[in-house]
Image: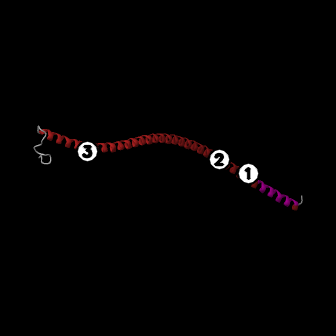
Amino acid sequence: MDPQVQKEYDAIRALLADIAKRQDRAEKRADAAEKRAVAADKRMDRWEQRADRADERRAAREARTDARLERIDARLEKHDKQIEATRRLVETGMKMLTRLAADVRGLVVDVREMKKTMRLLVETRANGNGRRKNPPFYSVQ
């Protein structure tokens, strides 16, 4: 072989060897990147599973909270009804007290008049013939 051709042939072989080394390094980098991608996918899958479990726990907690709030609302509604009934009772009692107070005032007036009438009756009957010794406006009590 001609030395010039041999030299070109050796240069081509060196280039091919260099290309093969670079290709090996690129394949190693690609393999490492693929391993990292697989590991990242596994981490992502684990993270998604944790997120799903957290969502399930959150949904269960919300369901419990909603049920508890419904029970509280029912109790509050019952208490509101009881308070309303108590309010109506108090209102009715106040109206009755107002009426009773008016009746008592009327009875007080009636008792005073009756007392006065009874005193006059007793005073008029104190003397046998119906004449009074001391008229009521002069009587001492």
The residue located at (63%, 47%) in the rendering is 44
Instruction: Write down the quadrant of residue 16 in the picture.
Output: bottom right
- Image quadrant where one finds the C terminus: top left
Amino acid type, mark 3: Val
User: Tag 3, which secondary structure?
Assistant: helix
User: Among all residues in the image, which is located at the extreme bottom?
Assistant: 4
Which residue corresponds to mark 2?
A: 39
Type of amino acid at the residue the image marks with label 1: Glu
Q: In percent of the image, x 38 and y 42: which residue is there?
A: 92
Whether residue 111 sits left or right of residue 53 in the image: it is left
Looking at the image, which is closer to me, 141 or 22? Answer: 141
Which residue is tagged 1? 27
* Residue at 55% from the left image edge and 42% from the top image edge: 57
Q: Judge left or right: residue 41 versus residue 133.
A: right
- As shown in the figure, which amino acid type bears the numbered disc 2? Ala
Which residues, given as a range, are shown in magenta?
A: 5-20
- Determine which residue is flagged by label 3: 109
Instruction: Give residue 29's position: percent from left, percent from top.
Output: 70, 52
Which marked residue is nearer to the observer: mark 1 or mark 3? 3
